[in-house]
Image (spheres, rainbow, N blue to C red):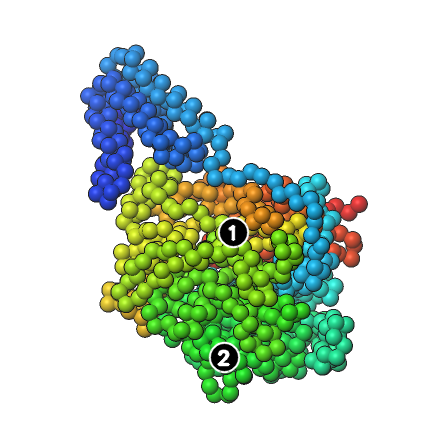
Amino acid sequence: MRKNNLLLLIVAAGLIVMSAMLIAGGGWLVSLGGSWYYLLSGIGILLTAILLLKRKSSALILFSIILFLTTCWALWEVGLSWWQLVPRLWVWFVVGLVLLIPWIRNSLTKSRQSTTCLLTSIIITTVVGVASLFTSPGVINGKIDNLELVQVNPNQVAGDEWTAYGGTNSGLHYSTLNQITPENIHQLQEVWRIQTGDMPTSNDPVELTNENTPLKVNDTLYTCTAHGWVIALEPETGKTLWKYNPAISNEGAGTFKGWAHMTCRGLSYYDSERYLQQAPDSSVAQKVSSSACPRRLYLPTADARLIALNANTGELCDSFGENGQVDLRQGIGPFTPGGYYSTSPALVTQNLVIVGGHVTDDESTNEPSGVVRAFDIYDGHLVWNWDSGNPEATTPLPAGEHYTRNSPNVWSITSADESLGLVYLPLGNQTPDQYGPDRSAATEKYAAGIVALDIATGKVAWNYQLTHHDLWDMDVPAQPILVDLKTSKGIEPAVIQPTKQGSLYVLNRKTGEPIVPIDEVAAPQGAVQGDWTAKTQPRSQLNLLPPPLTEQDMWGATPFDQLSCRIQFKSLRYEGQYTPPSLQGSLIYPGNVGVMNWGGVAVDPARQIIFASPNYMAFVSKLIPQSDVAKDAAQASEGAGLQPNHGAPYAVELHPFLSMVGFPCQTPSWGDVAGINLSNYKVTWKHPNGTSRDNTPVIPLPFPVGVPAMGGPMTTASGVAFLSGTLDQYLRGYDVTTGKEIWSARLPAGGQATPMTFMGKDGRQYIVLVVGGHGSFGTKMGDYIIAYALPNE
């Protein structure tokens, strides 16, 4: 009996604690205009605890009513959606089971009716939970079956080799190789792995990232590491042929911790023989061909250099710049260490190497220019510069002068159509990202858009802005994709631009005119005092934009953290997409990590399919008056996500929208794979992608919730796609026509990079992935490069 009483007291005490949380939090939520459920259920739980302490069997009846009504309420809010029902019901389901334990029931007054009532409610909840397992809200099941394949433009796609970051300068992430198929992919196996030796140190920034897509060209596999090491490998074995270490300078600081990023997304390759075959009269290619470096790699470094290396030996190409290097700091002006450099590969064309630059977000109003520069491919002299703050002045800047400070930059990957003589730039925003009353007319025209420049002169051919007066850090983050599309007008030269806001803008790459209609939709108004918002924003009719969030979409592992998310949601300003940043704090959805980021999408030009991996994570953006910033900017920026914005009246606090236990506040899925049929511009299939395996505390639980991915997909002619960027450590293979996952391989670290493929000398198709983790994404760090292939016959 003493044991029974002790257990009863423990259960009652637990219910009192839970009821206190529900009553306090529920009352707060009601005061904000939210659901009454939590307050009322808290009162019911408290009464249940009191009845238990009084040894009344009516406690079971009351709790059975609470459980039944909670189940009805959950069904009313979210229907038969497993991942939304579970957090609402599981705690009370477990409590119900505990109350049925004989030791508890035997401590209460005898009543068969009370036990029957509770058991009935538990059975009803069980049936509802089981029924929800057979539904798939938000999932689109379909098949893209474009039987009439389109003739592939060989200049746009990779074949036996992978010559540029996106396969080619068109950026499709598509290969004509077809040895690995949906039928034999189950035989795919690891054939080699190496470790580069470039691991994070205590002196590195948090955002040390391994985002490189290797090149396979010149019978060699080339890769770069986060610290800018270049490694040449034998493609079939992973054997190291040579290494080059640029010895990045931290300007005497002794640490890289103050830097925002450290990454190398890719190298660029130039082969003079290829260009001489295309244009025998090319004087620049002839110079390169006759030099000691007829085949070159171009490496952008984290201390703002552009280095040319002999692709055969790894030695510096002395003819380029000063002893093989161009100083990208020229004309840029002062900046903090790591505050300016190119994180993405340069674009190599017949005569030029074209490079943009990353600028640290929200550090100040006096940041380096976002200028894009074209250097002579042979000797590195500046041929033209395009500064979005001074867009007409493309003549090389005279020595001693500076480009426009704080102009929008191009930090992502660029593309080129050399037959049209155009280079395509994905433009970023002007910092501060969330405050912009003083932006120039040029900034308001070009920022957060796509710009086509004449390759030879740097002059603007056309531009299309994708976010007006951007206050949400909606940089255009991904490489523009150049593809020939089959339309009602015939085959049209298109550029497809993936974006953070979820739209995929499809434009004629000659003229910039939309191929898929773009609507100007009304946007929320009411920016902070002194600033303004655009009345409308452009939205493509082809998009992966999620529906607006509601209170019912708030999620959590338990009713308690779900309640905390509801309180946050009702406390923040939120009027849908493009809600302006505010002093109150605004919910930004999609957040600034985007529906799509630098990984972009992959396009199968033969089947006319887009393979995408959209993310769905909300962020909170809160403006903080500088007078209220209690700590110095350096300390604050390392603390609660406060960005200092020196020179602006507001700092900004920017962070993911998370519950009190660190889970996303909005309901899963947080990351999908999606297939778009370009014959009708419809999303034909869409499924949650990835599991919680590497993000659950204590025990790895692989719930298939769909998790964010940082890194892009790659597709092949056989109809197989590969993607590795998810928070769980897997490389996965998919059928591009249905999105079905048909293969996976466990990785030793985070795979936040885009895979590539090539044909080896041994006649095998290889899939290669850099597996090094991502500091700010929170995945396990490593230094691996792994290759996969079918078994030797």
Element assignment for label 1: loop
Numbered mark located on residue 392 in the image: 2
x and y percent of residue 634 in the render? Answer: 35, 67
Q: Relative to the observer, which residue lies in front, 422 or 347?
A: 422
Q: Is residue 307 left or right of residue 468?
A: right
- Classed neighbour count for the residue bearing mark 1: other residues with Cα under 10 Å, few (<14), some (14–19), many (≥20): many
x and y percent of residue 179 in the render? Answer: 74, 48
Label 1 to label 2: alpha-carbon separation: 33 Å
> Please, is residue 525 above or below residue 182 in the view?
below
x and y percent of residue 104 in the render? Answer: 30, 20
Numbered mark located on residue 169 in the image: none
State which tag comes first along the sequence, 1 or 2: 2
At 37% from the left and 68% from the top, the residue drawn is: 432
Quadrant in the picture for the N terminus = top left
Residue 170 seen in the figure = yes
Question: Could you tell me the amino acid type at mark 1?
Answer: Leu
Q: Is residue 418 left or right of residue 685?
A: right
At 54% from the left and 50% from the top, the residue drawn is: 613
Answer yes or no: do the residues labelled 1 and 2 have beta carbons within 8 Å? no
Quadrant in the picture for the C terminus = top right
Residue 638 seen in the figure = no
Q: Relative to the observer, which residue lies in front, 4 or 777?
A: 777
x and y percent of residue 498 in the render? Answer: 52, 57
Element assignment for label 2: loop
At 75% from the left and 56% from the top, the residue drawn is: 760
Numbered mark located on residue 542 in the image: 1
- Classed neighbour count for the residue bearing mark 2: other residues with Cα under 10 Å, few (<14), some (14–19), many (≥20): few
The image quarter containing residue 375 is: bottom right
At 74% from the left and 63% from the top, the residue drawn is: 219
